[in-house]
């Protein structure tokens, strides 16, 4: 199993959520986050003082999926979230050692 974490633009929340549900993803966690990368933010003026705003709003999707679904979902996320501009986001993939469904005690892929 793998954990796929995708950080994307806020305007991609609904299209990506719909695409993942259409791909039969059984569950996901979505969080509103802030961060910076290549965009490095922008400058604004507050009461006559220049302020660098370098924490940009993003949306983080977290999915735990079977190993064989990872590449399919990475391609789906890229196709749905890409605009071609700096700031489209990143995808991180981590190994998952174990999953336990709290309600039933099921373990492994059966718990997904």
Image (tube, grey):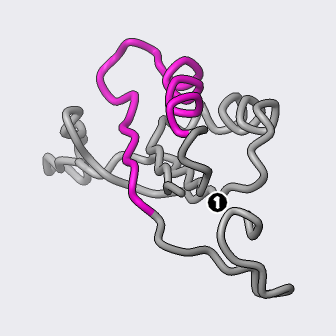
Q: Residue at x 73, y 29 (%)?
A: 19
Where residue 2 sits in the image (x, y, percent)?
A: 49, 55
Q: Nearer the viewer, residue 76 or 40?
A: 76
Where residue 47 sits in the image (x, y, percent)?
A: 24, 53
- In the current view of this chain or complex, which residue is farthest to the right? 104
Seen in the picture, residue 94 relative to 70 is either above or below; the reply is below
Q: Nearer the viewer, residue 40 or 47?
A: 40
Q: Left or right? Give the position of 68 relative to 24.
A: left
* Range of magenta residues: 70-95
Q: Which residue is mark 1?
A: 29
Q: Residue at x 44, y 44 (%)?
A: 7
- In the current view of this chain or complex, which residue is farthest to the top? 84
Where residue 37 sits in the image (x, y, percent)?
A: 22, 41
Where residue 69 sits in the image (x, y, percent)?
A: 60, 38
Q: Is residue 86 magenta?
A: yes
Corner quadrant of residue 101:
bottom right
Seen in the picture, residue 57 relative to 110 is either above or below; the reply is above
Q: Nearer the viewer, residue 63 or 10?
A: 63
Q: Left or right? Give the position of 97 relative to 22.
A: left
Q: Is residue 56 magenta?
A: no
Q: Quadrant of the C terminus?
A: bottom right
Q: Residue at x 85, y 86 (%)?
A: 103
């Amino acid at each position: 199993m793998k954990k796929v974490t995708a950080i994307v633009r806020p305007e991609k929340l609904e299209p990506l959520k719909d695409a993942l549900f259409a791909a039969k993803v059984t569950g996901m966690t979505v969080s509103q986050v802030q961060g910076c990368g290549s965009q490095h933010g922008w400058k604004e003026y507050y009461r006559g003082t220049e302020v660098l705003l370098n924490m940009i709003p993003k949306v983080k999707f977290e999915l735990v999926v079977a190993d064989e679904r990872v590449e399919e979902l990475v391609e789906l996320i890229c196709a749905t979230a890409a605009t071609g501009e700096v700031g489209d986001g990143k995808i991180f993939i981590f190994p998952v050692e174990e999953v336990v469904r709290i309600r039933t005690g099921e373990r492994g892929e059966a718990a997904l």
